[in-house]
Amino acid sequence: MAISHLHRHTSPGPLTVKHFIDSFQRIWLESRPARTGRKHDAHLPRRIGLAISGGADSMALAYLCKQWELNQRQTSNDTVSVTAFVVDHKAREESTREANMVAGWLDDMGLTTDILPLTWPSHSISAFETHARRLRFQALGQACRARNIETLLMGHHQDDNVETTLWRLCTGARGAGLAGIPAVTRIPECHGLFGVAESGSSLTLLNPEGLNYRIKTTNTNELKLTASPTTTQHQQKQYQISTGGISITRPLLSFPKRSLLATCKANNIPYVDDPTNFDPTLTPRNAIRSLLAEKKLPRALREESILSLIRKSNSLLRSVTENSNEILEQCEVLEFAPDTGCLIIKFPPPSKKPTPTEKNNDTSSLTLRRITELISPFPENHFPLRSFEPFVSRVFPSPSPPASSIVQERGNTPAKQQSFTLGGVMFQPLRCDSPPRPPPSSSTTTPDITTQNLVYENTYLLTRQPYMRNRLPILPIIVPIYPPSLPITTSDWHLWDNRYWFRVTGTSIPLSSGAGAGPTSLSLVVRPLQKSDLKGIRMAASKNEMRVLMDRLGRDAPGLVRFTLPMLVLVGDGGKEVPVALPTMEMWLPGAGDTLKSLSCNVKWEWMYKMIDREPLERTGWLKN
């Protein structure tokens, strides 16, 4: 959840570099880790991008950044590199001329400047503004990626913050919607662009040592959870998790528009003044701006009151997040398996002691969303908190009389819990008749994980929700085949189902004399494993191969989980498909080797799981700091 950090700048005079750096440093430290998946870094980034429109806001930002760049060059070996980007929308005849004019101003200022022309589709566009926004951010994001720029600065200021919040208030927003513009956030409109959106680097998560969990389906079609001690032969799993991407930073949010105008005036900085921004009849935003400027709004809707509302909303968000962290610490993630997209979590039992969940429904809704997003195939914050509210009582039950309590004394039958789907994730309740036996060595020592605290009531298996009919995610990949004598060019990463990044490379196998040339490329597809695939694989597999496959699926991807797994498929002539592998499980499928050998080539894949917020895993005890 993005939190806007608001610190009012009381002086209406021009800004200094110190004003700018202090604001930038504060919001970077406070907001950045949650937006990029990286650890805390006390230093500001040294490769900066600027989105420059030519208005007073962005031109003042450009001036301040240039002065910072000069100061660092003169006083420190830790230099700063600033690149300004000017988007040529190509939407009007004047667009290119205006972009060149602004770029000329930036060149005169001494800034490295790039003009980014947009390429529009040949067909007509219905939602012009929406499409222009998408093209603009994608062009900016790709330009930042090409130059190894980590964050893109934008010139939004305090007046923008007030206008945005007032407009949201008029449209019925609440909670985070009234907390203002986020100071640091992930770049929008770039989902699926590797190195731009929530990707570009990775970290390794180690599956913690402890108990091995397994889920079996009972005769009554219930899921039963069993656990056994980890053996010395058990290999600790490692998972690559996506991190990185370009962030948007707004270091001027605490400064009013008049300070930016004063900065331009004091330093003879030219800027464009768009008269359409002040016509109150054109847009609701313009009308709000006019009413604020002329002080025609009631006191409760004026600038000072809206700024107070933003501060209070941010304070509430911080409180809700802190309370959510407390609830997460009452939960226990028993297993998180990115390779199969599964999570086993024990939610807290009903308690007579009041918890933040009972005091604030937003807190429990936020907690449930944070847990769900570890598995969900949808982007972060895709679903509003209010959509989680009806399901809160299912996993965070309120105290109830002993006779009807979900958790009852041993020997009684717990009230039956039902499966449900929420936020793209299926929640399936798990049963455990008795705790697993402790390891033999535990009779004289107390291990880190004991069986005494493994009470499995209110425990759920979370997996990706089953696919809708005819809505399977299909990712086609054309893989060049490189001869052994040539260096292999790294292929692109592709996002599948919003959950997994894949990269596939192909090489040729040296041919025997007289053999014909192999293919120069392979046509591959990543799609979900389906029931019909198992029938086809069974025909190509030996009994032992099929037994190994089904045992592995039964152990790691029970029930419907297996049909959410990505499968790598070779597409031959006439569209004939040959299942090749379950790549996230690092498992070749029977018959794939013979097929590739007949084509005199081989393939290699890499994968990483989507970017996640690791704090829920830390708070629930699965991930150690």
Image (tube, rainbow, N blue to C red):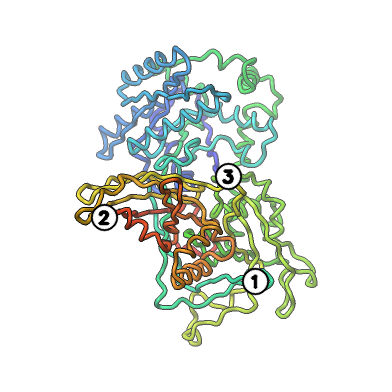
Secondary structure at numbered mark 1: strand
Q: Residue at x 39, y 48 (%)?
A: 41
Compare residues 228 and 523 and report the one nearer the observer: 523
Looking at numbered disc 3 in the image, what kind of residue is underneath it? Asn
Q: Quadrant of the C terminus?
A: bottom left
Please say whether residue 30 is visible from this viewpoint.
Answer: no
Q: Categorize mark 2 by other alpha carbons within 10 Å: few (<14), some (14-19), many (20+).
A: some
Compare residues 10 and 466 and report the one nearer the observer: 466
- Image coordinates for residue 416, horizontal then vertical, percent: 73, 68
- Image coordinates for residue 221, horizontal then vertical, percent: 67, 69
Looking at numbered disc 2 in the image, what kind of residue is underneath it? Ile
Corner quadrant of residue 591: bottom left
Label number found at residue 234: none
Q: Could you tell which of marks 1 and 3 lies nearer the N-terminus?
A: 3
Q: Quadrant of the N terminus?
A: top right
- Image coordinates for residue 314, horizontal then vertical, percent: 59, 42
Secondary structure at numbered mark 3: loop
Q: Nearer the viewer, mark 2 or mark 3?
A: 2
Q: Is residue 472 above or below residue 265?
A: below
Q: Residue at x 47, y 40 (%)?
A: 27
Q: Nearer the viewer, mark 1 or mark 3?
A: 1
Corner quadrant of residue 323: bottom right
CA distance for labels 2 and 3: 46 Å
The residue where tag 2 is placed is 509
Q: Relative to 111, is 437 on the left or the right?
A: right
Looking at numbered disc 1 in the image, what kind of residue is underneath it? Arg
Label number found at residue 381: 3
CA distance for labels 2 and 1: 50 Å
Secondary structure at numbered mark 2: loop
Q: Categorize mark 1 by other alpha carbons within 10 Å: few (<14), some (14-19), many (20+).
A: many
